[in-house]
Image (spheres, rainbow, N blue to C red):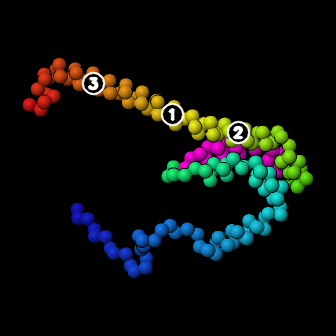
Amino acid sequence: MAKAKAKPAAKGKGKDKGKKGGGAKPVNRIALLLALMAMVPFSLPTLMVMVVALLPTLGAALAERGGSRYAWICVGGLNYAGLSPWLFDLWFGHHTIDYAVHEITGVSMLLGAYGAAGVGWLIYLAVPPVVSAITGMTSQRQSVTLQAQQKKLVELWGEGITHGE
């Protein structure tokens, strides 16, 4: 069976390989920004609490440089998890600015959110060496196994097999 030849793309229809990322149109970004700004008065207590409580996540995002940026994900996930009981209390209880200021100035909410972020930093710092050690041990064990198999093959086939004779 013969393969059908691919038709060339019509002018203007194909993707330009020189251009980077499609991204959203500027009109969509402006509409999204306007919608978010319209929601601020209704969510001001939540924003106040989140800005103060999620500072470790912001610090992790700004401090980490390089290609693989995972610190802010690890820190941010646990930071948000530590903050969530107080957010739920704010959302389903007293969603007022006074209550938000009361929570921000209280020690328990900050201790919960910042403590969870600290655990996130510990996990981020402790897991890579553990994974590296496990990988190293696995590779070493595999190397020993392959050397034992090679020795059995040499005994079975003779020394000439290792020299390419």
Is residue 159 found inside the magenta-colored segment of the image?
Answer: no
Question: With 80 as the anchor, is 14 left or right in this view?
Answer: left
The residue range painted magenta reads 69-92
Q: Position of residue 38 (x, y in %)?
A: 78, 68
Mark earlier in primary sequence (2, 1): 2
- Disc 3 and disc 2 in contact, CB within 8 angstroms: no
Element type at mark 2: helix
To which residue does mark 1 refer?
129
Residue plotted at (12% across, 32% down): 164
**Residue 48, image quadrant:** bottom right
Give the labeled residue for mark 2: 116
Q: Residue 52: image x %, image y %?
A: 77, 51
Q: Amino acid at mark 2?
A: Ala
Q: Please tell me whether mark 3 sits on a helix, a strand or a loop.
A: helix
The answer to whether 1 is drawn above or below residue 78 in the figure is below
Labels 1 & 3 near each other (Cβ < 8 A): no
Q: Is residue 92 visible?
A: no
Quote the CA–CA distance across marks 3 and 2.
46 Å
Residue that appears at 43% across and 79% down:
12
Say what amino acid the circle numbered 3 marks: Gln
**Which SS type dominates the magenta stretch?**
helix
